[in-house]
Image (tube, rainbow, N blue to C red):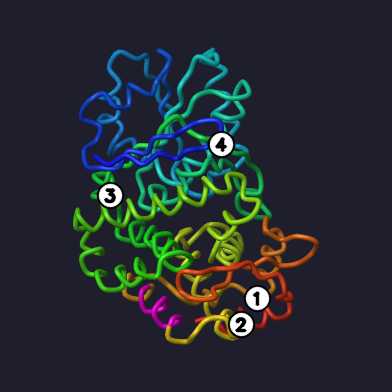
Amino acid sequence: MKKVSLKLKHKNIPIYIGSNIFVGSTIANHIKHKDVVIITNTKIANLHLKKVKRSLKGFLVKTLILPDGEKYKNINTLNKIHDYLIKNKFNRDLTIIALGGGVIGDLVAFASDTFLRGVDLIQIPTTLLAQVDSSIGGKAGINHQNGKNLIGSFKHPEAIFIDIMFLKTLSNKQYIAGLAEVVKYGAIGNSFFLKWLNKNFKAILLRKTECLIKLISTSVKAKVDVVQQDEKESNIRAHLNFGHTLGHAIESAMKYKGILHGEAVSIGMNFAAAISVEQSTLEIMEYNLLEDTLLKLGLPIHVPPSISDKSIMKHMSFDKKKKNGKNHLILLESIGKSFICDKLTDSYISKFVKTFQS
């Protein structure tokens, strides 16, 4: 089992990475109170809840099982969690465990931050996307009808447990979608990693254990390095949103149906890289490497034809990175080096969206 530490000014957060890491009592070492509530969804409960509960002997464990899907990452589900905690008369001597993918992780983190002004949280991400990205860094929140993650806070867990065995039960669609966030780390900060992903795509798609450990560990370390420099996204952490400006707009325009977050981010990365080429900051050979890697891994690269450019621009207008009326897109100077561009107009972006529809 590997251990990576996210070292912040106010706390150190251990991140455990391995296979079958719930054999033993490591998780118990990070729980301070007797009362524990595991919050998960219907799908994960059927697959993994018993295993996690077995590692919590000696605690008073209750479970709340929520419906599965991005469409439930909203104020209504947040209220449902609060109602459950209040009705069961929990106090601040409580640890909440988020067991699931990005939706559960974000939603439960926000609930744990807002219930009684904050109770302890442990993250157990079960999807690749959550393991390499959303469970790390403390972002918590819910979606609004006008956009993704528009309501939220920062809530860091006491510990994060990344078990690759969860990935064995993940569908191909979910697994491949998670690879988009892995590719992102190579694109914005590590050209050697992107080349490794491109070269080893077959073993990655077969979910070879050694490949999973390498790509997860490399991604986690990349995310930790950025968060340690910029916890609240005032500067460098914004670079982690490469591909997310268009990606979030696509998700919102499609009402979170028919497309996964990672798939939308993949389209957004290809889009941002193509703009980088047109803006003469990225060499065409480097763009080809990124696009080829996305395609080899089975990720989409074009905007779905069912979405209009007007709908995308409407949802992009709510992007959190937008400042003083200016679009802030993460573009590439080269593979492994990103920058923030605020010079692109709505009309330019809208025109480019049209050229990217399949």
Tell me the amino acid under the disc marked 1. Answer: Asp
State which quadrant residue 79 falls in: top right
- The residue singled out by tag 2 in the image is 354
- The residue singled out by tag 3 in the image is 167
Q: Is 312 positioned to the left or the right of 345 in the image? A: left
C-alpha span from label 3 to label 4: 26 Å
User: Is mark 1 in CB contact (under 8 Å) with mark 2?
Assistant: yes
Q: Earlier in the sequence, mark 3 or mark 4?
A: 4
Q: Earlier in the sequence, mark 1 or mark 2?
A: 1
Q: Is 82 positioned to the left or the right of 190 in the image? A: right
* Callout 3: SS: helix
Tell me the amino acid under the disc marked 4. Answer: Thr
Q: Mark 3 packing: few (<14 Cα in 10 Å), some, or many (20+)?
A: some
Residue range corresponding to the magenta coloring? 286-293
- The residue singled out by tag 1 in the image is 309
* Callout 2: SS: helix
* Callout 4: SS: helix
Q: Is residue 338 above or below residue 97?
A: below
Q: In front of the other: label 2 or label 4?
A: 2
Q: Earlier in the sequence, mark 2 or mark 4?
A: 4
Q: Mark 1 packing: few (<14 Cα in 10 Å), some, or many (20+)?
A: many
- The residue singled out by tag 4 in the image is 77
Q: Is residue 289 magenta?
A: yes
Q: Residue at x 66, y 49 (%)?
A: 150
Tell me the amino acid under the disc marked 2. Answer: Lys
